Image (spheres, grey):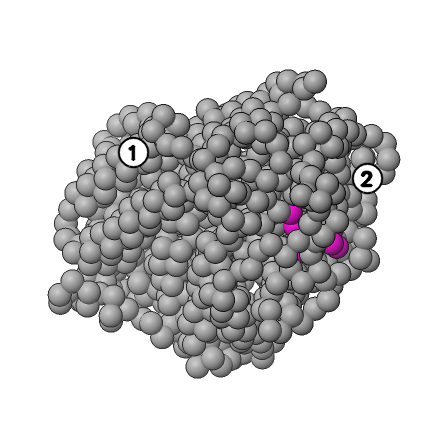
Amino acid sequence: MASIDATAAGSGVVNAPYRMCRFTGLKVDQAAETLIKVHAVTAVIFLALGGLMGLGVALTRWPAVQILPPEWFYLVLTGHGANVLLFWIIFFEMAVLFFASAILLGSRLAAPKVAWLGYILMLVGALMANYAVLRGDSTVMFTSYVPMQASHWFYLSLIVFAVGALISVMVFFATLVVAKNENTYDGSVPLVTFGAITAAIIAVFTLASGAIILIPTWLWSLGLITEIDSLMYKVVWWGMGHSSQQINVSAHVAIWYAIAAMVLGAKPLSEKVSRMAFLMYILFLQLASAHHLLAEPGMSASWKIVNTSYMMYLAVLGSMIHGLTVPGAIEAAQRRNGFTRGAFEWLTKAPWGNPAFSGMFLSLVMFGFIGGISGVILGTEQLNVLMHNTLYVPGHFHGTVVAGTTLAFMAMTWLVVPLIFRRDIIWPTLAKWQPYLFGIGAGGISLFMMGAGTLGVPRRHWDISLADAAHRAVEFPAAAYLMMGLNGLFAILAALGGLVFIVTVVASILAGPKLDGPDAKMVFPLHDASRQVSEYGSEGTLKLPGTIILVGIFFAAFVLYYFVNWKYLSELWLFN
Amino acid sequence: MAETPQKAPAGEAREKVPMMQQVLDNPFLLLFLGVTVPAVLYLIWGIMEVASVPVGQ
Amino acid sequence: MAITPPANRLWWKEPIHGVELGWIVIAFLWGLFMFFFMIAWHFIGDQNLSTETYRVKPAAYEEKVAAWAEQYQKIGADGEPVEVEGTPVVAPPEGGDVYILARLWEFWPVVELKKGVKYRIHISSVDWQHGFSLQPVNMNISVHPGYEHVINLTPTETGEFGIVCNEYCGIGHHTMTGLIRVVE
């Protein structure tokens, strides 16, 4: 063990045991390391649980299979949302925050005991939520719109979870202060840490909105408050519900930059532009909570337009910037690494066999093309009426949260296992194929759900044949049934990818080759630091034809799809 | 990987850090902005919209 | 690198890559276009969701809809009230008020509209939240209890159109439907 006493390096600072990472040269605080391990493992357990529930949902919505009866379908769908959308993602995000603060800044974690308190509260909340849902009296969906009422355990569980997460976020901010005061780094924080700060700031707004609405709703479920206004609930709840997904966006963009740096030695094209893009997130991304209120009565058009457009699309501008600077940084790095032929040698000769890279790049492409474009369309004030609450909505957010965030987090895990757990990947071949299996599955479910939604198929619906309905006035077209079937098939593919991920990660942690020894090598190597050229990337030193072509294709697809939807809208019945 | 942060030359160190960089280097200012902007534009304005719905006959 | 502090301490002063600058300009202008196009559609488009909304007590709304349905109940040639699967068909006067009530688990009543005529459609729920999804038109609007939403709607085609609930509303959610007929 390369554990060295901190006094060896520190001067008058609090003693904290740390080790030097042989692969990255980073100083790893051991309290932070343990917390990262625990959060990552917990996250993966909730991913397994939530993923299994998701498979049940997809196989029920496949009309020819319809594996679950209605009560179970709605129950499992509620559990699916909570387990993957909240617990998997936020546990993993806390690991990202500890990594981006203590480890990247070479600092000690501010208050490990408080961080443990946060963890325990989050765990208690997550377990309590599953208890409440599985009891069967909290089948209210992830959104739990009032006046439909869940068991008071359900609301309490989310409050406890949110308080725990808020405590951990505070430890993150405190660690920034510690690192600054103890001068563990020079100048500004790394870009990845800045992305994590963005995620943490959005998390504070998210958790505060959650507290504002869930505490009264909990009191209402206990009978202490007589009524919760349904529209008021929806406005404040989405301040949590949608913003929580903006934490993901910030976190996974930070991970894109991190993986590009660690695997390829990529450097941001310019710090200024990438950080300004994150600033656009900090200021405006959370306004997109209004995407869920475009079909609501009572909200004025001005409120809708200002909020749904993230203040004149400035947060979309941020995302489009990352969409250029991440592949741009990769192209610049690869050209420096010697892959200079043609427009795309940098991409074709990229380490596609390394699951950290392939997962990250697939996440980048699918988040942009599937999740990003569909999100802007859904969030256009008038176009929303074409797909509000249809399957298009889950199609969109499986493009962002599954194909984008989850795939990026999985890609990061392939680095966390060797670097933090210091165990090598036990089955490299399985790991190599995992991002493709999961990525294609996730991309498929996103596209087919969006397709079915375009044909009017409602979300959260057990039976689109409407066999028991009062009026069977709607006959969904055969294409809709086909898409639901394909959605089921791709869900199986994604579930397989998830299974391979979980089994390989767990087996590697438990029994993978140890990487403690001085000569141990990783099967998926990091970028060779000796080939580092420190001053590249910035300021027009390199031409980036491949990246220009890629963003050109993206922009053309975006503009085309945007106008196609206006065309659809203009053919609708007239209303105002 | 083991890129050692380059020590800035003494002259540059004394050069004033541009205003915008100071803003971006201050996480607590950013936290304040990142909570205030959506709290005002989304939450408070949104709640006022709900509260101002008139009562029907 | 992105995982180390910027090598240049005064990174703000570094010039921007030309490709970045070009893309920022394009993306910013596109954002402005999309923003102003939403505003423009309020003037040039025929599909803008009405914001006319009133607070209403669910019980009062239920009474109002029942009285209206009785007044304009469609009577068949045989002098009997026309019904579809037990739900009355209501044919409001051209251009008049139309009331649709959402409850567990139906949209009530069946309404008969004329093509090309603008109606004031009132929608509200008397229990939980529901989703008004008109199919196969594919027009989707949220329905709240306690809020009466008034939409000026002009059908542009004839036929039978279904309403599917697309907001989860309990165990019977997938049985909740309604019907709108549009005639010449």
The vertical placement of C65 against A77, above or below, is: above
The vertical placement of B45 against C100, above or below, is: above
- The foreground one among A6 and A178 is A178
Q: Which residue is mark 1?
A: C33
- Residue ID at (23%, 39%): C26
Q: Chain of mark 1?
A: C
Magenta extent? C170-178
Count of numbered tags:
2
Name the amino acid type tagged 2. Ser
Structural distance between the alpha carbons of marks 1 and 2: 45 Å
- The foreground one among A253 and C89 is C89
Identity of the residue furthest to the right in this view: A223
For residue A306, the mark is none
| Picture coordinates of residue A22, whole percent (x, y) | 42, 66
Check disc 1 and report its element: helix, strand or loop.
Answer: helix
Q: Is residue C169 visible?
A: no
Q: Is residue A275 magenta?
A: no
Q: Is residue C47 visible?
A: yes
Category of crowding for the residue at label 2, using alpha-carbon neighbours closer than 10 angstroms: few (below 14), some (14–19), many (at least 20):
many
- Residue ID at (69%, 36%): C73
Q: Chain of mark 2?
A: A
Nearer the viewer's eye, disc 1 or disc 2?
1
Q: Which residue is mark 2?
A: A221
| Picture coordinates of residue C86, whole percent (x, y) | 75, 49
| Picture coordinates of residue A190, whole percent (x, y) | 39, 46
On screen, residue A550 versus residue A566, left or right, reads left
Category of crowding for the residue at label 1, using alpha-carbon neighbours closer than 10 angstroms: few (below 14), some (14–19), many (at least 20):
few
The vertical placement of A543 against A359, above or below, is: above
Name the amino acid type tagged 1. Phe
